[in-house]
Amino acid sequence: MNENGELFADFCLSNDLVIAGTIFPHRRKHKATWVSPDGVTENQVDQVCISRKFRRSLQDVRVKRGAETASDHYLLVGKVQMKLRKFTQTTKNPRTRYQVNLLKDQNVNQAFRSCRTCKRIQKTA
């Protein structure tokens, strides 16, 4: 590992990331991301990093050698399968319901009309 590799590993450690390019079993040609110009030396110099929280979502990482890129590196592809939870909004205080049928009673109706706070409600309605 060179200095850049050490910096990358430190970066992943400090940001709670996992380096996931090397953990999947593949043939060597599907792991090597760089091949020397002589065609003999192969190295895995490109990696995939993913949040530790989502590391179980990463299904596979492999090299696609047939992709046309203007580089001496091969394309590295990761397959991710996300499992999303259904979002349900829970409210501790449900919507207030008013018993308007009580206003039919004359006593309650008179008390409502004479209440100061209720007069503000009547004006806005």
Image (cartoon, rainbow, N blue to C red):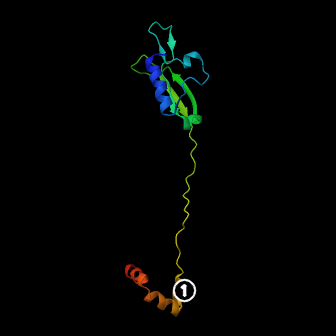
User: What residue sits 38% from the left and 78% below the top?
Assistant: 124
Q: Position of residue 42 (x, y in %)?
A: 51, 12
Task: Name the quarter where the C terminus is drawn.
Answer: bottom left
**Height in image: 96 above or below 17?**
below
Q: Residue at the bottom extreme? A: 106
Q: Position of residue 78 (x, y in %)?
A: 53, 29
- In front of the other: 81 or 88: 88
The secondary structure type at the circle numbered 1 is helix
Q: Residues within 10 Å of mark 1 (few under 14, many from 20)?
A: few
- In front of the other: 97 or 79: 97
- Amino acid at circle 1: Leu
User: What residue sits 51% from the left and 14% below the top?
Assistant: 43
Q: Position of residue 88 (x, y in %)?
A: 56, 56
User: What residue sits 46% from the left and 10% below the top?
Assistant: 36
Asked whether residue 74 appears in the rendered view, the answer is: no
- In front of the other: 49 or 78: 49
Q: Position of residue 21 (x, y in %)?
A: 54, 25
Name the residue tied to disc 1: 102
Asked whether residue 95 appears in the rendered view, the answer is: yes
- In front of the other: 118 or 34: 118
**Height in image: 29 above or below 82?**
above
